[in-house]
């Protein structure tokens, strides 16, 4: 089975990554910092918090979130590329695309960028013309929809325990 390294700092990327991971068959190690630690824990995704270099070295490929103000994911892409590892980054937002990949004053792009909606896909394709851009399911959003639908159904059935969203 393929082992991957999962690197994340910000909450948005951690939500998308953790929900994606729950539906995969990969063996994975994580390097989490900041809000991502709590997100992975809350989503019941096993975290290992390995050393960044070790996690990348032991992995077949690396998948990251993207942070605008943290360098964790940028450093991971930089190290992985130096080691010849395939890199993928999930973009979870529609702003500061290039800034999310500037490390040591250089644009360090992953081999692939994944997005979850058409607007982000078109924007990324326009900005990163030579990088593979793929649109993936947003399992985090799908999960939120299910939670909301359950609460609406409970409300419609007259459940006295309904406390709103």
Image (cartoon, helix red, strand yellow):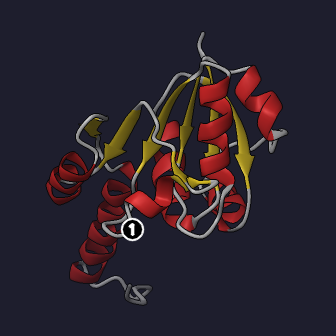
**Relative to residue 114, is residue 4 depicted above or below?**
above
Q: Nearer the viewer, residue 90 or 105?
A: 105
- Residue at 59% x, 21% y is 85
**Relative to residue 32, is residue 1 depicted above or below?**
above
Crowding near the residue tagged with mark 1, few <14, some 14–19, many ≥20 C-alpha atoms within 10 Å: few
Left or right: 30, with 96 as reference point: right
Left or right: 165, with 76 as reference point: left
Residue named by callout 1: 96
Q: Which quadrant does the N terminus fall into?
A: top right
Residue 44 seen in the current view = no
Residue 48 x/y as whole percent: 79, 40
Q: How many marks?
A: 1
Left or right: 60, with 24 as reference point: right
Residue 101 seen in the current view = yes
Farthest residue, direction top:
1
Q: Nearer the viewer, residue 159 or 105?
A: 105
Residue 93 x/y as whole percent: 36, 65
Q: Secondary structure at mark 1?
A: loop
- Residue at 65% x, 26% y is 82
Residue 91 x/y as whole percent: 39, 53
- Residue at 37% x, 49% y is 139
**Relative to residue 85, is residue 87 depicted above or below?**
below
Left or right: 107, with 79 as reference point: left
Residue 24 x/y as whole percent: 48, 28
Q: Which quadrant does the C terminus fall into?
A: bottom left
Q: Nearer the viewer, residue 67 or 159?
A: 67
Farthest residue, direction front:
105
Q: Nearer the viewer, residue 84 or 116?
A: 84
């Amino acid at each position: 089975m393929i082992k991957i390294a999962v690197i994340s700092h910000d909450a948005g990327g951690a939500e998308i990554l953790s929900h994606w991971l729950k539906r995969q068959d990969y063996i994975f190690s994580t390097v989490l910092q900041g809000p991502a630690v709590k997100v992975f824990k809350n989503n019941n995704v096993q975290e290992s918090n390995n050393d960044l270099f070790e996690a990348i070295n032991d992995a077949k490929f690396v998948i990251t979130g993207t942070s605008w103000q943290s360098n964790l994911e940028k450093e991971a892409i930089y190290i992985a590329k130096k080691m010849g590892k395939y890199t993928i980054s999930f973009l979870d937002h529609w702003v500061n695309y290039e800034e999310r990949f500037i490390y040591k004053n250089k644009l360090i792009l992953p081999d692939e960028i994944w997005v979850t909606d058409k607007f982000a896909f078109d924007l990324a394709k326009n900005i990163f013309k030579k990088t593979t851009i793929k649109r993936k399911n947003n399992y985090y959003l799908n999960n939120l929809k299910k939670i909301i639908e359950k609460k609406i159904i409970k409300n419609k059935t007259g459940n006295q325990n309904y406390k709103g969203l």
